[in-house]
Image (cartoon, rainbow, N blue to C red):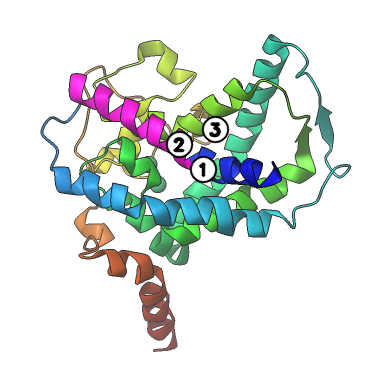
C-alpha cells in the first residue's frame, strides 16, 4: 500500500503538468497571440520536461528539506478550515511569496551570474504554455530555497484540505506563459495574466526590465517596474542582441551557466 502511495506521489506532478500543458495547447490553438509558432520550439520544451521535473521533484526538495520548520515565522496564518478561508490564505501566501520572488527575479535580470542561469528561459522566441518548464535546472533547484527561506521567517500558513486551490497555484506559471490573445483589461492591474508576462519576455526596449512579478503586479507598481500593456499589445519575445545569442543545442542549454561563469571570472582577472 505504501509503495502504491509512493508511486502515485511520484507520478502525480507529471500528470498535473501534462494536463496543464494539454489544456494550454488547446487554448493556444483556439486563440493564439502569435499564430503559427514553429512546432520544433514546443517540442524542444517538451523534450526538456524530464529535466524540469527532476529539478522540481528531486533537486529542489533536497535543498528545501533544510528550511526551518514551524515556530520561526513572525506571522502564523490558519484560515484554511473553510473554502473561502483557504482561498484567502492561499492568496495571502501568494502575495507574500511574490514579494520575495520579485526581488529574486529582478536580481536575475540585473546581476550577470544569475542572468547566466535565467537566460535559457528568455531565449524562448515562441512564448507558449510549455515555456513554463523551460527553466534551467539550476534555477528550478535554487528558486524554492532563495524564495522560501526568507519567506519561512515571515509567514507560516497551515496546510488546507482543499487540494484544488493548491492545484490552481501550481497551474499559475503555465497560465501566464500561454500564447493566447487574452487581455485582462483593468483586472490586469490587480492580477497577472499571459499578456502582462509576455511583456516581460518582449524584445522591445520599452518593455525591458519590466513586470517581474509572478502572481500580482502590485510589487511591480510599488517598485516602479510595471508596464501595463495596451489591449492589442502582444509583442515579439526572445533575446535581444544585448542579451547574446540563444543556445544552439540542448547540451549547451544545460551547461551554459558554467561556461558563462568561467568567462565572467576570466574577464574579472584580466
Ligand atoms: Zn525574467
Ligand atoms: Zn516567463
Whether residue 180 is visible here, answered yes or no, is: no
- 71 displayed left or right of 17: right
User: Which quadrant of the rendered structure holds the N terminus?
Assistant: top right
Disc 1 is placed on an element classified as helix
> Quadrant location of residue 169?
top right
Q: Which of the two labelled residues, at mark 3 and mark 2, occupies the earlier sequence position?
A: 2
Image quadrant where one finds the C terminus: bottom left
- Who is closer to the viewer here, 14 or 107? 14
Look at the picture and state if 26 lies above or below 144. above
Magenta span has 53?
no
Which of the labelled discs sits on residue 11, or is there none?
1
Looking at the rendered structure, which numbered label has been put on residue 232? none
Q: What number is the disc on residue 15?
A: 2
Q: Residue at the spot x=29%, y=18% of the render?
A: 182
- The answer to whether residue 54 is above or below residue 3 is below
Q: Residue furthest front?
A: 1
Gap between marks 1 and 3 measured at Cα: 35 Å
Instruction: Kindly indicate the quadrant of the structure image that contains residue 34.
Output: top left
- The residue segment tinted magenta is 14-30
* SS category of the residue bearing label 3: helix
Q: Is residue 226 above or below residue 142?
A: above
Amino acid at each position: 500500500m505504501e509503495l502504491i502511495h509512493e508511486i502515485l506521489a511520484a507520478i502525480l506532478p507529471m500528470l498535473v503538468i501534462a494536463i496543464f500543458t494539454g489544456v494550454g495547447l488547446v487554448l493556444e490553438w483556439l486563440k493564439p497571440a502569435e499564430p503559427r509558432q514553429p512546432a520544433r520550439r514546443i517540442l524542444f520544451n517538451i523534450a526538456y520536461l524530464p529535466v524540469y521535473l527532476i529539478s522540481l521533484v528531486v533537486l529542489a526538495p533536497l535543498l528545501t528539506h533544510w528550511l526551518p520548520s514551524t515556530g520561526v515565522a513572525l506571522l502564523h496564518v490558519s484560515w484554511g478550515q473553510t473554502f473561502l478561508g483557504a482561498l484567502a490564505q492561499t492568496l495571502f501566501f501568494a502575495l507574500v511569496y511574490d514579494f520575495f520572488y520579485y526581488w529574486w527575479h529582478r536580481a536575475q535580470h540585473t546581476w550577470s551570474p544569475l542572468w547566466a542561469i535565467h537566460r535559457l528561459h528568455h531565449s524562448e522566441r515562441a512564448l507558449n504554455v510549455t515555456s513554463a518548464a523551460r527553466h534551467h535546472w539550476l534555477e528550478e533547484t535554487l528558486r524554492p530555497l532563495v524564495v522560501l527561506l526568507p519567506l519561512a521567517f515571515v509567514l507560516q500558513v497551515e496546510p488546507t484540505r482543499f487540494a484544488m486551490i493548491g492545484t490552481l497555484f501550481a497551474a499559475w506559471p503555465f497560465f501566464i506563459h500561454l500564447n493566447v490573445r487574452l487581455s485582462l483589461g483593468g483586472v490586469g492591474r490587480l492580477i497577472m495574466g499571459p499578456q502582462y508576462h509576455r511583456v516581460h519576455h518582449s524584445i522591445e526596449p520599452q518593455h525591458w526590465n519590466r513586470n517581474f512579478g509572478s502572481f500580482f503586479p502590485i510589487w511591480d507598481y510599488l517598485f516602479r517596474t510595471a508596464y501595463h500593456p495596451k489591449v492589442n499589445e502582444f509583442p515579439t519575445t526572445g533575446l535581444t542582441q544585448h542579451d547574446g545569442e540563444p543556445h544552439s543545442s540542448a547540451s549547451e542549454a544545460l551547461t551554459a551557466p558554467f561556461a558563462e561563469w568561467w568567462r565572467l571570472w576570466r574577464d574579472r582577472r584580466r
